[in-house]
Image: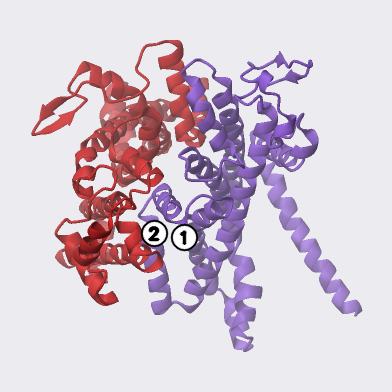
Amino acid sequence: MLAFLFRRLGQSLLVVVVMATLVFVGVYALGNPIDILISPEADQLEREQAIRRLGLDRPFWMQFWIFLTSALSGDLGKSFVHGVPALDLILSRMPATLELAGVALILSIGIGIPLGLVAGLAPKSLLGRGIMTSSIFGFSLPNFWLGLMLILAFSVELKWLPAGGRGATREILGIQWSFLTLDGLRHLLLPALTLAIYKASLVVRLAYAGTREALLQDFVRFARAKGLSRTRIVGVHVLKTILIPVVTVVGLELGSMIAFAVVTETVFAWPGMGKLLIESIYRLDRPVIVAYLIVVVLMFVVINFVVDFIYTLLDPRVRLTAKEA
Amino acid sequence: MAVLDAGNIKAADAAETWLARVWAEFSESRTAVFALGLVVLLVVLALLAPFVTPQNPYDLTQLNIMDNMLPPGERSMDGRLYLLGTDEQGRDMLSAILYGLRLSLFVGGTATVIALGAGTAVGIVAAYFGGRVDTALMRLVDIQLSFPAILIALILLAILGKGVDKVVIALVSVQWAYYARTIRGSALAERRREYIEAAQCLALPQSRIIFRHLLPNAFPPLVVVATVQVAHAIALEATLSFLGVGVPITEPSLGLLIANGYGFMLSGKYWVAFYPGVALLIAIVAINLVGDQLRDVMNPRLKR
């Protein structure tokens, strides 16, 4: 078990090193780093200073070393546009994105499991077939277009919910959160729903398949023979078995939620790091792009590591193969 | 010569019966056949866009600014019908959508074909040679697949810049890994079969074994993956173009048309963003339905 963890940790570190090298090659070797890392509006003196500070007058391998060490100490350069360290900028936007992705995750489970359960209990019924057909649409709906249509329906036509922004926030542990205020929740609902629909259809399909399988198992037949109520059989015995695959998949999908938040945040003007990335791409604010990349790669490596770890705890087969290797 | 002809005919027969079998099973689902018909219709409409659209949406001389922002079904100054309305430049939305669909399908199709080729090459090499080559290539695939496609494509386009060719490059870079993994799996299973062993005993050249024996037999599972990936590629291209990092404004794909309509939506002029999205949705749903049925047909575990 421990050996497996160390091996997996080594692999994660390898990914970080590979990504850092790719970023370095992309930024330093392919283009002219002076153009990329120093603002076009800097005057001659600033340019000289920056070239010395970044070590661009040194040999290539020295530059790589400087890039690595400064990245490790959290110095990823200053944003051209905002004039503050790029890393601080990313980190200040991160809570908004995490909040959006977290609420979307909860929504996708909250929508997906009941619908999948209902469809799985009555696969031949009109309702069951309707749910499964809609799940194909949920898969196929382009995320951004769905967001636009929700805005059109609930903001423009019905005027129930706001079309964009984060609304009022409340501070906890020095970070502003929207979900703690009613206004914030109203702002959060549409973007979170947009982000959740795709995953919800995924969860519906998993829960559907899981329910159909579970109903044929002996423990369900036994529970029926004991005379347990239908609610108890479905609510406790069936639900428990379908939760395992759903939780695993949803854990793996958290990362892709954060990535897809780029789209949702742009549609709903949600001030998270995804929107920051798009703005930085438009304005060629390269230090911020590099910082986003490194932060997101680190986040993904951590998420994948944690999911793998939980997976080994849940599934003995993975542990066994790891022991053999 | 006669013998050779007979062999050819036999091969053709076998191919026909395989296709016929797939078709027979595929056509069991009326929804899937309908979806396939829809896909064919969309492709034909996209190919023939210059001949069937009322106007050429790229030709500024054909646009009449007086006709701008007309709602669907309205007539122009000179009595022409705008079935799906017009945008802010007086462009007929139906024409713009068909031209956009043309570009979206072209980008999605091209990217899929190239990624299919590249992924197949990597996967079959990994499966055939095994050992360290296999480990190294598959580790690369694992690492790439642990990051969402949209993120990789977005970063690539941030470095490369806008352009149809660059979108294709980005889509290929994110998709090859799916094919590589799929074909490696099926080729590994095929490699252990006797006919490969027989071919090796005959001392046939490696390239011949790979291309004539291994590849054709390992290929069928890829058909399903490729179908689903075309839908993904189209959706991804639309998303990237919507974000403003995809195709240039001079060649609007469906995603860019929707982005354009975004600005008018808040004032209730829904049609500029609505109809391109409907076209996109129909295309993606139809392709996904075809893929769904193909998966069932090709799945050996569901064989009756």
A244, above or below B121, in the image = above
Answer whether labels 1 and 2 touch (C-beta < 8 Å).
yes
- Counting from the top left corner in percent of width and height, residue A323 is at 22, 68
Q: How many marks?
A: 2
Look at the image and give the colour of chain B: purple
The mark nearer the N terminus, 1 or 2, is 2
Q: Quadrant of the N terminus of chain B?
A: bottom right
B89, above or below A306, in the image = above
In the displayed structure, does residue A84 sit left or right of residue B8?
A: left
Identified at 23% across, 57% down, the residue is: A46
What's the mark number on residue B144?
2
In the displayed structure, does residue A305 sit left or right of residue A197?
A: left
B44, above or below A152, in the image = below
- Counting from the top left corner in percent of width and height, residue B180 is at 49, 63
- Counting from the top left corner in percent of width and height, residue B291 is at 58, 45
What's the mark number on residue A160?
none
Q: For mark 1, what is the residue? A: B177
- Chain coloured red: which letter? A
Q: Chain of mark 1?
A: B
